[in-house]
Amino acid sequence: MGALSANSANSATKVTDGLVVPPGQGRRLVTHAHEVTFKVTGDRTTVGSVFEVVVPPGFDVGAHAHANSEELFYVIEGELELLAFEPRTRTPDNWRSWESASGARPVRATAGTVAHVPPGCPHAFANPTDTPARMLVQAAPPPAHERYFEELLEIFSAGGPPDLSAIAALRERYDIQQITPLRTAAP
């Protein structure tokens, strides 16, 4: 059974039918560094995009903050290290040792863990295990995060090591402040 869709004449603000996206369905973007499946996009909603992300072993998105976006992460399977707070001190290389003023530290997140990230809040995720992890992400407002992922995965698809200057320019265009480096393999 394929995804049920709204009438094609409807826009995101005039959609009258709901949407059911079965497991394994959605628009998939795959590279060696990341896999993203769009489940609900900005053409259907003004509230927030929803996508599933497969995080390969060794991948570290690096600590970063979105000036205008809000995100919610839900771990579906596997384990991730997650960060969602402002640290006492922002160190430029490794967020895993950060601590907040209240004593919060990055957590080892397992299936069922939720993290909410308001605009401007530093956050990160990494897969320190030898198995892929899956998470559901909601990003608001849409469709900026969708476009960002499309462009980021184009950079990753170019082959060879990721072009860090292209990633930096992309993040600047989308008001993302990168605090620690993105890594596609374990250090």
Image: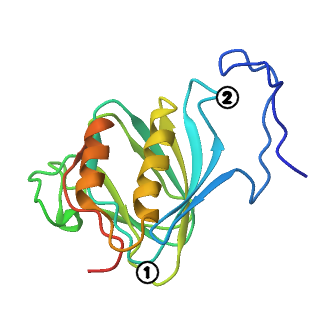
Left or right side of 25 for 75? left
Residue beneath disc 2: 44
Identify residue type, mark 1. Thr
Identify residue type, mark 2. Arg
Left or right side of 26 for 117? left
**Gap between marks 1 and 2 measured at Cα:** 35 Å
Disc 2: CA contacts within 10 A as few (<14), some (14-19) or many (>=20)? many
Left or right side of 178 for 34? right
SS at mark 1?
A: loop
Residue beneath disc 1: 129
Which residue is located at x 53 percent, y 75 percent?
132
Counting from the top left corner in percent of width and height, residue 160 is at 36, 74
Which residue is located at x 17 percent, y 58 percent?
99
| Residue 84 visible, this angle | no
Mark found first going from the N terminus, 1 or 2: 2
Residue 160 badge: none
